Amino acid sequence: MRKLIFIMAALALLAGCASEGTKEQAGAAVEDRKPAVGEIKPPVAVKPAPDTAPVAKPVVSKPIAVNPLKDPNNILSKRSVYYDYDSAVIKDEFKPLITAHARYLAQHRSAKMVIQGNTDERGSREYNIALGQRRADSVKQMMLLLGAQESQIETVSFGEEKPRAAGKDEASFSENRRSDIVYAGE
Amino acid sequence: MKIYHPFRIAQFVLLWLSLATAAHAQLTIEIIGGGANQVPIAIAPFKGEETLPQKVTAVVAADLVRSGLFRMIDSGGLTAIPAEPAEVQYPVWTARGADALVIGNVSPLPNGYWDVRFRLLDVAKQVQLTGFAYQVTTQQLRSTAHKIADAIYEKLTGDVGVFGTRITYVVKLGTRFELQVADADGYGAQTILASNEPIISPKWSPDGTRLAYVSFERKKPVVYIQSLLTGSRTVVANFKGSNSAPAWSPDGGRLAVVLSKDGNSQIYLIDADGSGVTRLTHAGTIDTEPNFSPDGQWVIFTSDRGGSPQIYRVPVGGGAPERLTFEGGYNVSPRYAPDGKSFVFIQRNAGYFNVAVQDFVSRQTQVLTENGIDESPSFAPNGRIILYATEIGGRGILAAVSSDGRVRQRFSAEIGDAREPAWGPILKGQ
């Protein structure tokens, strides 16, 4: 009798394991269906932080927990994507940055960000709001394909209203044609 | 239409001199150019106005001159100031070349009010064209002068006067943004909202009591409505993403707004209390800058669905948008004329952004400005003047051009950049 009870308990345990396993698999399957992770293949692989970290000599024994989002040696500290005039097309040079942030969101499901689209000052203010929105959305779409979740990203536009560079020259204009990534709480 | 007025350069220089010294008025106005057929009009000093803190005739004359449709005939050096038609010596005014003469008087009433009355006389026919009397407070003397100018303008041009209306605009002072409301002559500017975040797209409710606008104070564009009577304000649209480009329906009950909550920037209709959101346009591209037709049947807007930003219109009940502009690769910011027969917009030409008007029937476009960095055009409620923002020497100023392109004005804030102007409606009871 005692043996029977033991067997039943074991079965129950197994069943529990099995159902948990099914859930995980289902979760994984959903993830896998997002083709981007496999297919988009960022042109430049994101180097993990430890590769560059050894340059800094740890003098103190107590390990300093570096926030990867703030670490200047980490690509996650880079937050701006730049565009051509009247364009929301993401240039190749910014794909590694977007990929890294998408992976960060995928690995930190509680992390949230706002992507702020910006334009240069030329043209209609309201059209520029829409154009900045399109720029922010283009970054978001790429991140979703790379595993970030819709609920993690809000895209907003500042249009031409909050220029980083005040000049009236092309250098200033190109600095202002930009999407910025800002994490919640920053 | 490009009119090159010989006096423009000289007056442009004068404009800058006046800008440098302007200290008393919040908005300085300069007139550039003038109408082809200006009515020669004399305004005699009103009997009794010399003791007033605000000379009524000075305001009336400034209004009429600013329209570009009148030429002031000297009314100085009179032996006796005529206050009644019987006192007018018509040969004097005929000799001075006046077609029309304004006379009047101002007298104090026992209750502290002023009795202001005027008559507009036809010098050739020696008859009265119009005349009114007003009982007003000292504070109302200036608005009374605008009413007199409106009555004169209406009688002599056949158009409704807009001297008694108000305008709104945003002034940027360093990192500070102020939403201001001023009389149409730039006088009496009041700040109704100040913020360290941008404010754009203020739009008058049809009854002139409220402004809808976009503020970035929540770190994203959100649409608000603010009462000019109480100062209270409400959020109309604060959905996920960006909320912008408010436009009032002619009955004041609804707004068209641009939301990105469902993806790309699209036009939605929303009740003025923020309820009842319905989507109006359905494109995968940018649809923005909606504006209702005066009859409330159409919404005109900017869209890049054809590959470049162009002007379209859609029935307010929904349907297939119709493209309206085809010349040039950048046509934006459409606003209906008050009669609904044309619309004003900004057209890019060779790197410049100019004010243009297109007729709905003929489809003909008139470009009214040249070599500008012009933005945000809107019609005066009589359809005769278009107010817009432009830039001179890197500084934002407001400007106006008559709808035939002949008369131009520039409004300049004392300090800071002025932008995002909108001309208010003619208030009921005016």
Image (spheres, coloured by chain):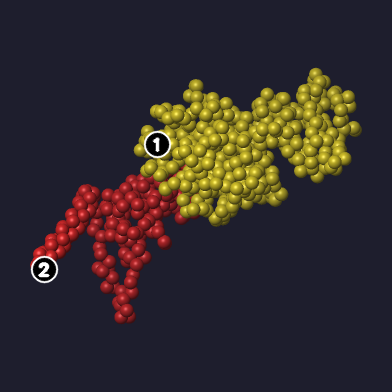
* Chain in yellow in the render: B
Identify the chain of the residue marked 1, using the numbered disc in the image. B
Q: In the rendering, at what x and y percent does residue B406 appear? A: 61, 30
Q: Is residue B273 left or right of residue A12?
A: right
Q: Mark 2, mark 1: which one is toward the viewer?
A: 2
The part of the image, by quadrant, that contains residue B397 is top right
- Find numbered disc 1 in the image and state the secondary structure of the residue it sits on: loop
The tag on residue B6 is none
Q: Nearer the viewer, residue B293 or B227?
A: B227
Quarter occupied by the N terminus of chain B: top right
Query: Which chain is the one coloured red?
Result: A
Amino acid type, residue under disc 2 in the picture: Arg
Which residue is depicted at the point 41% across and 41% down? B265
- Can the viewer see residue B425 in this picture? yes
Q: Quadrant of residue B118?
A: top right
Pointer 2 chain: A
Say which residue appears at 43% left-offset and 42% top-offset: B259
Quick check: B124 left or right of B386?
Answer: right
Residue A93 can be seen, yes or no: no
Q: Which mark is residue A2?
A: 2
Residue B253 spot, x, y in % from top left:
54, 35
Q: Mark 2 and mark 1: span between their CA atoms?
A: 76 Å
Q: Is residue B197 left or right of residue B65?
A: left
Residue type at tag 1: Asp
* Looking at the image, residue B1 lies above or below residue B213: above
Badge 1: how crowded within 10 Å, few (<14), some, or many (20+)? many
Q: Secondary structure at mark 2?
A: helix
In the rendered image, which residue does mark 1 sit on?
A: B304
